[in-house]
């Protein structure tokens, strides 16, 4: 933990595993069908105070914002598998564009637009393909 | 005593000794510089640090200047906005009031913020 965080009374970020486990708090989480043991998380946005994660289980894609100024992360939205895939393919539209030097905006389907992402996290592989791959890995 | 040592180590993170040495060195350099400035003030009636050394208040000013330099050196080193070397000690000793706002700015830097939404 950074001293600046200690001075300002902030907690640590949730780890990859903790974020995956946090999806259980979603009101859309279905313990009978979903399994967090096989889930995968992809961090798309990172600043000193915030991290945004996409977590894919076998049934849903979750967007979780971990803001260390708040007591716990927040589940922003979730999308069911049926709206992400069809006939063995990822069908949801994913579009990314520049916003500033360090950040861009990504639209995930028609309902979840303008989500910030950090370009630095996607130097080797672009964000569109990373999200598609995440969905493909866990749902197809 | 052991408890307070643990608290201090927790606050300072890795390299606690290095931060302490840097903070103490900054305080000593700060004290030397302010004493030199006080001497200059007595001779030239002008302070290069824009301080005022009148009567007993001079002692208070000197102590506070050294204490401030030490604290800024300690925190600046711990949050990695200062390289912990002699040059940085001198810079902190002379100009800690100018560095302090940078530390606060670094702790609450203006970054883009993702707005939270409520899951439907």
Image (cartoon, rainbow, N blue to C red):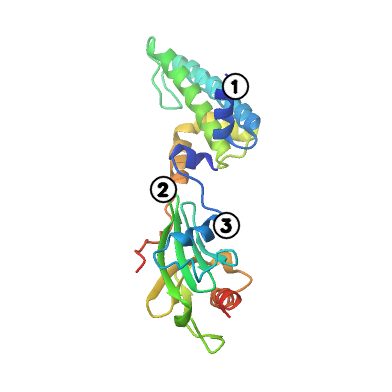
Any part of residue B66 in sight: yes
Relative image position of residue A45 (x, y in whole percent)? 50, 63
Chain identity of mark 1: B
Q: Secondary structure at mark 2?
A: loop
Q: CA distance from mark 2 to mark 3?
A: 18 Å
Res A110 quadrant in image = bottom left
For disc 2, the marked residue is: A71
Q: Secondary structure at mark 3?
A: helix
State which quarter of the image contains the C terminus of chain A. bottom right
Front residue of A140 and B7: A140
Can you name the residue that lies furthest to the front here? A32
Q: Residue at x 46, y 52 (%)?
A: A49
B13 above or below B117?
Answer: above
For disc 1, the marked residue is: B2
A50 above or below B12?
Answer: below
Q: CA distance from mark 2 to mark 1?
A: 30 Å
Say few, some or many: other residues with alpha carbon within 10 Å of mark 3 (under 14 / 14 to 19 / 20 or more): few
Relative image position of residue B44 (x, y in whole percent)? 45, 18
B57 above or below B68?
Answer: above
Chain identity of mark 2: A
Look at discs 2 and 3 and give the one toward the viewer: 3
Relative image position of residue A23 (x, y in whole percent)? 47, 62
Respond whether the residues carrying marks 2 and 3 are from the same subunit. Answer: yes
Front residue of B66 and A116: A116
**Which badge, 2 or 3, is on the more N-terminal residue?**
3
Q: Secondary structure at mark 1?
A: helix
Q: Residue at x 48, y 78 (%)?
A: A81
Respond whether the residues carrying marks 2 and 1 are from the same subunit. Answer: no
* Left or right relative to A51: residue B114: left
Q: CA distance from mark 1 to mark 3?
A: 33 Å
For disc 3, the marked residue is: A17
Any part of residue A100 in sight: no
């Amino acid at each position: 933990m950074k001293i600046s965080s200690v001075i300002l009374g902030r907690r640590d970020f949730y780890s990859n595993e903790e974020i995956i486990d946090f999806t259980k708090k979603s009101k859309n989480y279905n313990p009978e069908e979903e399994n967090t043991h096989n889930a995968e998380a992809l961090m798309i946005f990172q600043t000193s105070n915030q991290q945004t994660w996409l977590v894919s289980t076998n049934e849903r894609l979750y967007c979780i914002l971990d803001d260390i100024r708040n007591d716990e992360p927040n589940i922003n939205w979730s999308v069911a598998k049926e709206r992400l895939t069809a006939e063995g393919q990822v069908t949801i539209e994913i579009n990314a564009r520049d916003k500033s030097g360090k950040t861009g905006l990504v639209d995930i389907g028609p309902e979840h637009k303008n989500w910030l992402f950090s370009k630095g996290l996607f130097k080797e592989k672009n964000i569109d393909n990373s999200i598609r791959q995440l969905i493909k890995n866990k749902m197809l | 005593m052991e408890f307070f040592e643990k608290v201090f180590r927790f606050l300072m993170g890795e390299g606690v000794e290095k931060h302490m040495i840097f903070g103490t060195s900054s305080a000593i350099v700060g004290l030397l510089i302010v004493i030199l400035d006080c001497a200059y003030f007595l001779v030239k009636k002008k302070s290069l640090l824009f301080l005022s050394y009148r009567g007993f208040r001079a002692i208070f000013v000197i102590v506070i200047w050294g204490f401030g330099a030490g604290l800024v050196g300690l925190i600046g080193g711990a949050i990695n906005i200062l390289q912990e070397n002699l040059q940085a000690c001198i810079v902190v000793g002379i100009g800690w009031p100018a560095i302090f706002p940078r530390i606060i700015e670094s702790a609450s830097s203006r970054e883009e913020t993702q707005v939270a939404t409520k899951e439907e």
